[in-house]
Image (spheres, rainbow, N blue to C red):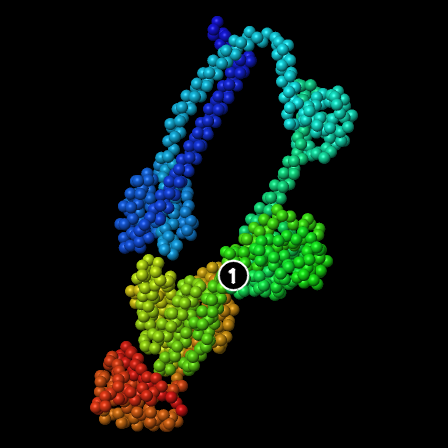
Amino acid sequence: MAGRRFRSWLSVRSVAGQVFVLQLVIVLLLGAAATIALVLQVRHDATDEARGRSVAVAEAFANSPGIVQALHSRNPTKVLQPRAEAARKKSGLDFVVVVTPQGIRLTHPKPDRIGKHFIGNIGPPLRGHTITESRPGTLGPAMQAVAPIFNGHHKVVGLVGAGITIQKVSGLANRQLPLLVGAVSASLVLATGGTALVSRRLRRQTRGLDPVEMTRMYEHHDAVLHSVREGVLIVGGDGRLVLANDEASRLLDLPPRPEGRLVDDLGLEPHVADVLASGRDVTDEVLVAGDRLLAINNRLTDRDGGPPGSVATLRDSTELRALSGRAEVAQKRLKLLYDASVEIGTTLDVGRTAQELAQVAVDRFADFVTVDLAEPVARGDEPLAVGGVEMRREAVHGIRPGQGHPFYPVGRVFSFVPTSPQAFGLSRGEPVVEDDLTEALGWQAQDSERTAKIIEYGVRSLVTVPLRARGVLLGVVSFWRMKQREPFEEEEVSLAEELAAHAAVCIDNARRYTREHTMAVTLQHSLLPRALPEQNALDVAFRYLPAESGVGGDWFDVIPLPGARVALVVGDVVGHGLHAAATMGRLRTAVHNFSTLDLPPDEILSHLDDLIARIDRDEGPGGPEGEGAGSEGITGATCLYAIYDPVTRRCTMARAGHPPPALVRPDGSVEFLDLPAGPPLGLGGLPFETAEVELAEGSHLVLYTDGLIEDRRREIDTGLEMLRDALSHPGRTPDEICTEVLEALLPSNPSDDIALIAARTQVVGGDRVASWDVPSDPAAVAGVRAEVMRKLAEWGLDEAAFTAELVLSELITNAIRHATGPIRVQLLRDKALICEVSDTSSTSPHLRYAATTDEGGRGLFLVAQFAERWGTRYTSGGKVIWAELAIP
């Protein structure tokens, strides 16, 4: 008996069974939802906790004292490994890893992984941003954070990665899940018991409904129907209104007691009555009813065997439409601000930035926009005060581009009168709104003729906002609207201020860049050679083109040397800006100083290498005054140094990481000389090698910097082949070579400086050179003097004969007395008369003042007095003492 009862109330055909099934479904759904919510919440909390712990440990370790010094120590792993492991164990993380900027691990919980590449995204941290990322691990998903390590110059010198598996922090679900399962089971038991009780009660009371219960049911139905905020209409199959609740009567303005009347007789608007009586399904159709917008839904009632007719619901969407309109306006303004953040400030040009501000605001916010800046701003200077300062019109843009406008043109310089809205806004630092310009007498006082044209053109209202950035007033932006649009409202002023604030920062950035760029260009031009020195060994032409993005450190030089020789120098300092230009000037000065020593090219480069290493050591971040002392140091430099001798036609060259020179022979064939590359300057410890090549008369030696052949859009080998093609044309002058090479290879937007030298070789003929071998016998000096006198007479230099005789006698006598080996005398007629005495000794004579009682020691003093210049040049076989005498 009990079993049959259980089966009867458990049957889904009974009310009790249906209630039980419903409760069962609800409990199961709630249990499933609670379980899913618990798992998702725990997973979210675990992920957040893992991310927070990883970021906290990574940033704390990256900013811990001594980590920068440890990174620069000889063995960073030895110092950092125990510290990283201690931090990992104390924080409970799975790993704490220190990584170099190149992505190489310096520490790891597993020592065998030290020195390998770090697995993760290190791009943003190298730019100074801490990031977190979820990565699969051997123990499950893990969260890792990567934080940058900054030195005293806020430069990233390393990275710290920290991570933990999410499973370690997600144990809450395991603890709460049994409790949740128990709660669901208890709910099922209660539902089962409750269903049994309800079933027993229903069997006693559901033989027939009581009239009171029926009345109460109707009252409840009627109360619900008439209290909802949505209109409900029931229309019968015959088109008569069966039921209308209070909200429907209010929305449609129905007459009293409308039930039983035809829908067409209720006085509704035809399109509304047509929808209600149409007998068709309608979903959210918006109709106008009087001064309201109604959203109507209509559904048929006879789909599942019900009575014929339809049920319509009505919603008043008038306020929703108004809110939607305001939301649309707000969305457009946000879109305008977003576009402004993207489109304003794309370049570091003041005028272009002002034009971008005008373009982004036209049509969407204003019909015309004018931007006026203080005169010093365009030059990169900072205005002392904007009030009373002359303004320059930097930008004008409107809705009718190309059709003219009534405003001051771009480039016009003027001053705002004190009564104008712009002057008032600048003095107060606040925006000013003019609703009707026809009544703005203060604005009309600016220029009565011009303002009359503006009003006649149809401009109606104005809002002007000062351009302020970092506490400096740069100028003013004015937004204008035509009379066809509504004038500016007060709530739109904030949008104008936002646009002006963003543009002002961009304009100030461009102003600062302009100032720095101007200073760097001025410095660089003052350091580069302005004219080539006079010499007869080479016919030289040059070109120098700065990069568009900034001043670089390329330089060149043509340096005359003793013996009619000439040195050609081309160099490149890595980087741009003031530091690169100043470094270039220091290196160029050093090359000039080292050249006076008349050293071979490889020794010149060695001295430069030592100089750069000493500058980096003394002035770099690790200078003698502690970390961060001094300047930035020299990040790298290349150089090519060549010496050409027009007598022997031999060119001696050495390079330090610089592109090889090109040799253009007289027949037009081109060869890139195979010089030993050598390391860039500043690495130290590695020697430089010298190569020597014999050049035919009329050959062209072309020296250049890497900006000529390197470009983002082509490989360096392609650039070299293009240079070969541009040079392989005989019969051109050095100036023509420079012009045509730049036409062929110059990029459209050079990102690096370009220095180019083309030098055509010339030869000192045998008719201008004379040489003699001198025995190591003082008696031979007289014979050599006689030969020299005859040669000078042959050259027509009798006036210089006495001086030459005196100088050569002293130099030859010193060589015989103090030197060893064969002695050779050479005369060279160039711009000056060059006297050279060579021997195999490496000792050099020194000039001194002889005492009154000394019998000797005055010879070199006389040489120095009579010669224009004199000195010593060391060779592989000894030395050459030379003296240059002026030719009358």
Give the camera-side residue of 721 and 795: 795
Image side of residue 696 versus residue 454, left or right: left
Above or below residue 158? Residue 605 is: below
Name the side, left or right, on which 304 lies relative to 688: right
Outermost residue to the top: 1
Q: Residue at x 33, y 94 (%)?
A: 802
93 or 620: nearer the eye? 620
Secondary element at image label 1: helix
Q: Residues within 10 Å of mark 1 (few under 14, many from 20)?
A: many
Q: Residue at x 67, y 51 (%)?
A: 435
| Image location (x, y in percent) of residue 300 | 68, 24
Residue 498 showing in the rendered view = yes
- In what quadrant of the picture does the C terminus appear? bottom left
Q: Position of residue 399 (x, y in %)?
A: 66, 55
Looking at the picture, how far across and down is residue 615, in whole percent? 34, 65
Camera-nearest residue between 432 and 238:
432
Which quarter of the figure has residue 565?
bottom left
| Residue drawn at the location 33% of the way across and 44% of the way down | 96
Residue 344 position in % (x across, y down): 55, 54
**Is residue 539 depicted above or below 313 in this figure?**
below
The residue at the point 23 percent across, 84 percent down is: 819
Name the residue carrying label 1.
Answer: 511
Which of the 4 image quadrants contains residue 562? Answer: bottom left
In-image side of 209 versus 506 (left or right):
right
